[in-house]
Image (cartoon, rainbow, N blue to C red):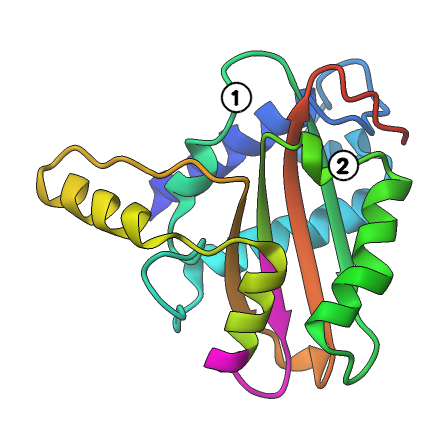
Amino acid sequence: MSYIFRDLRSLIQQLAKHSSGSRLDKKPSSDFNFALQFSRPSEFLQSLLDIIRVIFEPRPPGTFFLNSNLDFLTAGIPEGPFEFGYISLVSNAGQPFGDFWTEEVRPYLNKHGYHLANTLSAYAVVSTGGEYPNIMFVDEASTTLASYFGEDDVVDMTKSFLEGEPRIPRKTIYSGFCLDPALDDKIRLSLWLFLPADNNSPQ
């Protein structure tokens, strides 16, 4: 299991170099002030915690989600220069995911210059409280995010694993689902985005 944490630390350090909200021009002196590289450090940390949560979530909704599939994320890191974006928002009590996305998330993305049409890839962690996300909720959120794998994607990826040469289908948004009882009847969406180097996102 230790290799996962090593990979995560290396991943975070790599992403920090590309953060559009970076406030430091040099590597932090220690891991304790690492998050200060980001213009919204608390929000970045919450998004990071949700990425870790989705990797270790004990009840994944299925095989083809971000749950337990860190490779979906690491394989999506561009080889050349790029910008890294992040958000973490909590809905109003009882707010449907579709309304949350339209009324809160999309305006917030635009506010920070994160335009999904220009996104190279994005990774969404949807957390709910009270009870584990049911099939209807997963379907609504996946449809809203357009994060479903198509039938051909599923067949191709399954075949590649059986052949011993895993191939991850390229898509814009990957999603995973988690339970966080502290949310009660609210939803939290944390999103990581890889954007073109010339995105010019505001802080």
> 87 or 170, which is in the foreground?
170
Q: What residue do we see at 62% from left, 87% from top?
A: 130
Question: Is residue 130 one of those drawn in magenta?
Answer: yes
Image-quadrant location for residue 19: top right
Task: Specify whether 153 is left or right of 117.
Answer: left
**Mark 2 neighbour class, 10 Å CA radius: few under 14, some 14 to 19, many 20 or more:** some
The range drawn in magenta is: 125-136
**Percent x, y of residue 50:** 60, 57
Mark 2 residue element: loop
Q: Residue type at mark 2?
A: His
Residue holding disc 2: 115
Is residue 32 visible in the rendered structure shown here? no
- Ranked by sequence position, the earlier of labels 2 and 1 is 1
Say the numbered circle drawn on residue 78.
Answer: 1
In this rendering, is residue 6 above or below 50? above
In this rendering, is residue 40 above or below 74? below
